[in-house]
Image: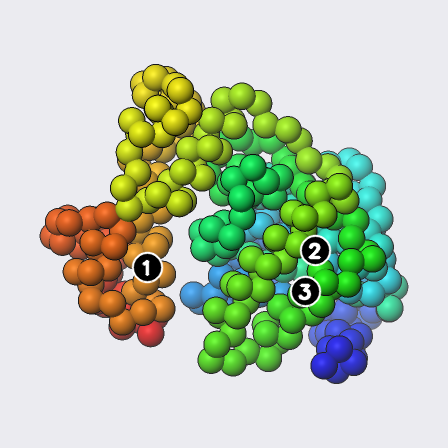
Amino acid sequence: MKKQMYYKLLALTKEEIDILEGADVNQSLYTDDVDFIVDSNKLLTKNKLIDIRKHPRFVHFPEHKHNFIELIYVYKGSFRQVVNSQKLTLKEGELIFLNQQISHEVLPSEYRDIAINFIIKPEFFNYILTFLDNDNIICDFLLTTLYTNDARAEYLYFKVSQNKEIHETIDKIMWELYKPSTMSEATIKLLVGLLLIELAKNSDSIEGYSANDYEKKLVLDTLNYIDTNYKTATLYEISDKLMQPHYKLSRIIKKYTELTFNELLQEKRLSKAAELLKSTNLPISETAQSIGYENLTYFYKIFKEKYNKTPKKYRDTVS
C-alpha cells in the first residue's frame, strides 16, 4: 500500500506539468474571488467534507488564505512556507494545522518533496470533537476556529517526525480518501479522531499556539458544554457551572461568536440531526426527540430553514 501510494504521489500532475512548461499558479483552479482566498468548493466534490490533494511542486504559491481548515502533512522530503511573515521548514513526517484567518505562501519544492493538503470543511469536526477532552490544546484551537469571532490568525505546528503511530494513522486516512469504499466515511471520521488524540498526547511537540484570554476560555467551555449536552443544555446550567451571571456569559458568547447561546445550541442540534438522518434509519420523530426537540412541527420548520429541505427530502438526497 505504502509503495503504491508513494509512486502515485511522485507522478507529475497536469498542473505540475504546466508549471514545468513555464505556467504560473492558475488561481482560477482555487478561487473565483478577487482576493486569493482558496475556496473549498473548488477542491471538494458536492457533499464531501474532507479530501486530500498533493500540493503542487516547483512553483512559488503566492500568499493566500482559505475558507476551510487546512492540514499540511509532509509525506516525503521537506516543505517550505512563510506563515504570517515567519519562514517555516517542515521536515518529513511533520504537519501543521492552519485556521481560516491565517495567511501563508509556499516556496518552490523539488521533485521528491511531497506535501499533502487535507482540505477540511469546519462542519467535519462537529463529530470529531466528541473524541477530545475539554482541556486540550487541539480542542481549543478547533473550537476557536469553528465558533468564535476572533480574527487572530493561528496555527499548530506538530514536530512529530519520529512518531510512527501518527504516520501510520495518516497513511490510513490517505488510503481511505484515495481508495474509498462503502465504509470509508465512517472510517475516516474514526481515524481523524484517533489522529487528533495521538497529536494531543504529544502536546510537547506543538509550536505556534496562542493562549486564550479569560473571556475566550469561557466561550470555549460553553461550546464544549453544548457539544456534549446538546439535548438538555441551557444557558442557566452552564452559567452555574462556570460561576458566571447568565446575562454576562450571554454577552460574552455573543461578542465572540456573533450568535446567542440558543442559536449555537440550535446549530449543534441541527447538525446532529443531519448526521443522524444521513447515517441511521431512525424515524424522523425519534431523531427530533434524540436531539432535544419534542415539538415535531417546530423541528421541521427550523430544519428546512437551515438546509432548504424537509428532513425526509434531506435523507432521500444524502442516502
What is the x, y in percent for residue 271? 35, 53
- 21 vs 275: above or below: below
Residue 170 bears which disc, if any?
Answer: 3
Q: Secondary structure at mark 3?
A: helix
* Amino acid type shown at disc 3: Ile
The colour mode here is rainbow
Which three-letter amino acid code belongs to the residue tagged 1? Answer: Ala
Identify the image quadrant of the C terminus: bottom left
Marks 1, 2: nearer the viewer: 1
Q: Is residue 153 visible?
A: yes
Residue at 82% across / 44% down in the picture? Answer: 88
Q: Amino acid at mark 2?
A: Ile
Q: Is residue 122 above or below residue 187?
A: above
Q: Which residue is nearer to you in this view: 69 or 272?
A: 272
Q: Is residue 88 left or right of residue 210?
A: right
Look at 28% across and 46% down and name the residue there.
231
Q: CA distance from mark 1 to mark 2?
A: 29 Å
Give the numbered dot on residue 274: 1
